[in-house]
Image (tube, rainbow, N blue to C red):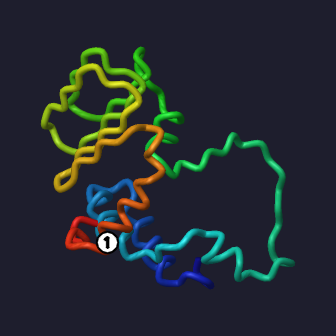
Amino acid sequence: YRDYLPKTHKQLMIIKEGIGTAHEKETLDIHYPKCDKISIDYGIMEKVDKKDVLIIPAVLGWSDVGTWESILEELPRDENGNLIRANHHGVNTSNSLVFADKDKLIATVGLDNLVIVDTDDVLLVCKKSQSQHVKQLVQELKETKHKELL
């Protein structure tokens, strides 16, 4: 990071200092968005001299947590297959993810295989099997009058 993504390196060092302090969340909220928006393979690995790279074979059970569906598959779920991180009450709700960053009650009835994400400025509801299209939705929002939400 220091050599190939110095702007990100600087921000990560600031974040590192904030971890475990009373200002951890604030530090992360301020400095993480200032990091380069590029994956490590493009930002670093494609630029390094291959003779300086070591590969160690390992079986780690890797999962690319790039969609809400994959998050649902990786984290523990309740007896109905739901992953709930919200003030939620559900009736006949199964195999769904419900996330909110506020205390408003999210009530669900008769739902299966959905992703519901409620933040201060956006409510996302989609079929779990379609959650990979959230990236497309974000791109379209960037190109419209709603880019201030991103």
Q: Residue furthest left?
A: 104
The answer to which image quadrant residue 142 occupies is bottom left
Tell me residue 109's x, y (percent): 23, 21
Residue carrying label 1: 142
Query: Residue 99's spot in the image, x, y percent?
Result: 30, 39
Q: Quadrant of residue 94?
A: top left
Q: In the rendered view, does 141 fall on the left or right side of 44?
A: left
43 and 21: which is toward the camera: 43
Q: Along the horizontal axis of the image, is 49 left or right of 106?
A: right
The image shows residue 123, relative to residue 149, as above or below, that is above
Left-right relation of 125 to 56: left
User: Residue 16: percent from the left, percent from the top?
Assistant: 44, 65
How many circles with numbers are drawn on the protein?
A: 1
Q: Residues within 10 Å of mark 1 (few under 14, many from 20)?
A: some
Residue 1 sits in quarter: bottom right
Dot 1: element: helix
Q: Which sits in the foreground, 47 or 3?
A: 47
Q: Is residue 61 above or below residue 111?
A: below
> Residue 74, position in %: x, y?
53, 36
At a point 66% along the width and 45% down the height, the residue shown is: 62
Q: Residue furthest right?
A: 51
Residue at 35%, 42% in the rendered image: 126
Quadrant where the C terminus sits is bottom left
Q: Is residue 66 left or right of residue 59?
A: left
On screen, residue 83 above or below 139: above
Query: Which residue is rendered at x = 23% and y = 45% of the image?
Result: 118
Amino acid, disc 1: Lys
Q: Residue at 20% of width from left, 73% of height from top?
A: 145
